[in-house]
Image (cartoon, helix red, strand yellow):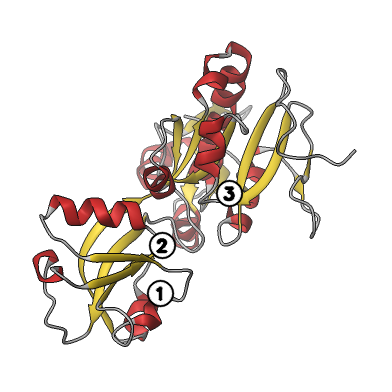
Amino acid sequence: MSQTLQDAPNPRRVRLGLPKGSLQEATLRMMRRAGWNISVSERSYFPAVNDDELEIVLLRAQEIPRYVFDGVLDAGITGFDNVLENEVDVQEVCELIYSKATSKPYRWVLAVPRGSDIKSAQDLEGKRIATELVTVTRRYLEKHGVKAEVEFSWGATEVKVPALVDAIVEGTETGTTLRAHGLEIIDELLASTTRLIANHSAWSDEWKQQKLIGMSTLLQGAMRADGKVGLKMNAPRANLEAISALLPSMKSPTITPLSDEDWVALEVVADEVQVRVLIPQLMGHGATAIIEYPLNKVIP
């Protein structure tokens, strides 16, 4: 029998919704670094995963909060903007600061054609606005005491101004696409990051709560490791102070005595971009046997 969303969640398995679409590859990459290898079939919404306690469902990120709230999913990874747009009461397990292109928050901004008479929210009175984030946009207008028509946009929102609408509320990471379409940002409605959320009933289940807490620890550890590497080296004890001053560290470098009392072994975590400058400096202070290795997770 084929699997469906209507199947009741297993009490000893977490049914987790992951975003399908623009966030999919970044999410699967993060999951892989955290220890979960997910095999996605082109036509299946239920990919395989190397964890018998986990059941993965691929859905549009915009739908995940509603399915979590309704109890169809135990938990899900989605944007905070989608939680607000769906107006659902869910348990936030943790914040996961990543997105499809950068590690910056995804911003929902009010944009108008360059040179427009619209300079602020108050200038939207009686105007027409297109957006995928209708509920949040309406709240924004209410907050500013402005009445305007807000219509749902199915995509390509930036091409609708000025021919079809007066302004748009659009999501952006860098603003590049908006600028390319001759638009300028006049206000920011929301800065959204990705969240791991859970259904309150699932969260009240001790086993599922512990599974989700463990998952959040590993996922956040995978994000901390992004762009970082480990460094090992041998260093002359006489130069230890100078070498230690060069080394970045979450706390302090790990120092291990060697059989030769004049030498020690050092280990540290560093930003990958720093290493190309750091290694020659370390060698200049007598460090040898320098090993750089990748990191999957950093748990403080």
Residue 281 placement (x, y as % from top left): 43, 57
Q: CA distance from mark 3 to mark 2?
A: 56 Å
User: Label 2 near label 1: C-beta < 8 Å?
Assistant: yes
Question: Of all residues shown, which one is farthest toward the top?
Answer: 206
Disc on res. 288: 3
Q: Which of marks 2 and 1 precedes in the sequence? A: 2
Alpha carbon separation for disc pair 3 and 1: 56 Å
SS at circle 1? helix
Nearer to us: label 3 or label 1: 1
Label 3 element class: strand
Residue 112 lies, with reference to residue 278, above or below; the image says below
What residue sits 62% from the left and 41% below the top?
17
Of the pair 142 and 78, the residue shown nearer to us: 142
Lower position in the chain sequence, tag 3 or tag 1: 1
Q: Going 52% across and 27% down the picture, which residue do you hit?
A: 199
The kind of residue on which mark 1 rests is: Thr
Quarter residue 43 falls in: bottom right
Classify 132 as above or below 140.
Answer: below
The residue identified by callout 1 is 157
Residue 152 image position (x, y, % from top left): 40, 64
Identify residue for label 2: 132
Give the structural element (helix, strand or loop) at label 2. Answer: loop
Give the percent coordinates (x, y) of residue 21.
Answer: 60, 60
Q: CA distance from mark 1 to mark 2?
A: 8 Å
Residue 145: where, in percent of width, then height? 10, 55
With respect to residue 208, does 236 lie above or below? below
Q: Nearer the viewer, mark 3 or mark 2?
A: 2
Residue positioned 45% across, 33% down in the render: 94
Amino acid type, callout 3:
Thr
